[in-house]
Image (spheres, rainbow, N blue to C red):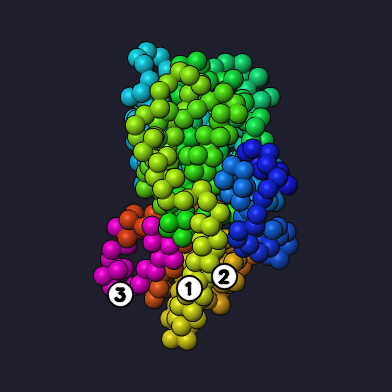
Amino acid sequence: MICRICDGTDLEPVLDLGEQPWCNHFLKPEEAGTEPRYPLRLVYCHTCGTTQLDYTVKKEVMFADHTYLSGVTKSLSEHFRRVATEVDARTGSGRKSVLDIGSNDGTQLKHFQALGYDVLGIESSKPTAALANEAGVPTVHTFFNGETAAQLGRQFDVINAAGVFFHLEELHDVTDAVRASLRRDGTFVVQFLYMKKIVENLAFDQIYHEHLLYYNLRNLGTLLARHGLEIHDCYLTPAHGGSMIAFASHCGTQNPSARLNEYLAAEDASGCNDIATYHRFAGRVREVKTRDVAFLDDAARRGQSVYGMGAPVKGNTLLNYFGVGPDRISRLVEKNRLRNGLLSPGMHIPVVMEDELDAPPDIYYVLAWNFKNEILANNQHLVDSGVQFYFPVDA
């Protein structure tokens, strides 16, 4: 393969998580065992320092009918509110417009609407786009690319891409479409899982087929530069264990901030763009597998019941890599009703609704670890009663 960002050919494998199903392919009970599996391998580009997957599951498979909803968790909605407020403070007065790529159920755009923006969402999942439109958020059901941008035939003050820019199979076409759709004085907001934090937190479960690329600021800057865009500011948030919010613009229109330069210097000092970092990361991932399988086996020997807290997509990377099924974790407890009654892909653990449980387990193995504070606050009564909340990733 060639590098998804720089077209380099010097690529080295660094982490192999095995053959796994597409992790958002939650199954009806009668579908169990029919799900296809694909290689889940992380490789490193020696030319531009980008870690990426070497196998692509087609976007039409992964995003045409996915079950993820951004509005399920209050903390994520609050994060989106803060982002909208920050972006608004950077734009001029008067009527303003925002395009959200991969807008999901419209949670981010609702916060821009509250600030008086003319909003438009682009969402590839038909049922999710329908939910957004029903909630009063204008949303087009399609994939964003050059053809879509030409059909829209307009430019925007703000283009937002939250948790989607590392998904892109048509990476260069989409990035060029962003440049064409952004007003000359506009701002492109890229919200992405920060690979430096993934490595530091040992959050290997955030590696899955939907995430084709893993960005630090250095390699994101390489990509944007190919398309006439450049990062001029950024900041790190705690969302999802460490998400970077990068602000980009047309080349030559903004000066880089001192804060951006500090983050870039910190990347260089940490070695987070070096191959040795990823070999060490892979070794630590193997160690945590040994640790957690032993923990779950010990709970089984003790006769303790274990439920998974949450059924996030990333949890399926962990469950499949660990080989943990219903014999160790008997059910996954969720709030998202689109997953009610389904089975997790690969391991076939049943998903049940949190408000339908008769009694709690002895242990909650928290797959939705990125919402740790919200989960503990909502379940303090269970903590007080002796239920153990175990976090495989403690970010």
Q: How crowded is mark 3: few (under 14 residues within 10 Å), some or many (20 or more)?
A: few
Identify which residue is drawn at 38% across, 20% down: 91
Q: Are marks 2 and 1 in contact (CB under 8 Å)?
A: yes
Q: Label 1 sits on what residue type?
A: Asp
Q: Label 2 sits on what residue type?
A: Phe
Count the numbered circles shown: 3
**Quarter-of-image position of residue 222:** top right
> How far is mark 2 from mark 3, CA to CA?
26 Å
Q: Element under label 1?
A: helix
Question: Which residue position is annotated with label 3?
Answer: 386
Q: Label 3 sits on what residue type?
A: Gly
- Magenta residues span 377-395
Identify which residue is drawn at 39% across, 35% down: 261
Q: Residues within 10 Å of mark 1 (few under 14, many from 20)?
A: some
Question: Which residue position is annotated with label 1?
Answer: 292
Q: Element under label 3?
A: loop
Position in image of residue 182 (x %, y %): 53, 20
Identify which residue is drawn at 44% across, 34% down: 246
**Towards the viewer: 279 or 169:** 279
Above or below, 147 relative to 392:
above
Question: Which residue position is annotated with label 2?
Answer: 322
> How far is mark 1 from mark 3, CA to CA?
20 Å
Q: Give the number of the mark in front: 1 or 3.
A: 1
Reply yes or no: does residue 183 show up in magenta. Answer: no
Q: Element under label 2?
A: helix
**Towards the viewer: 30 or 197:** 197
Residue lying farthest left? 384
Residue 110 appears left or right of 38: left
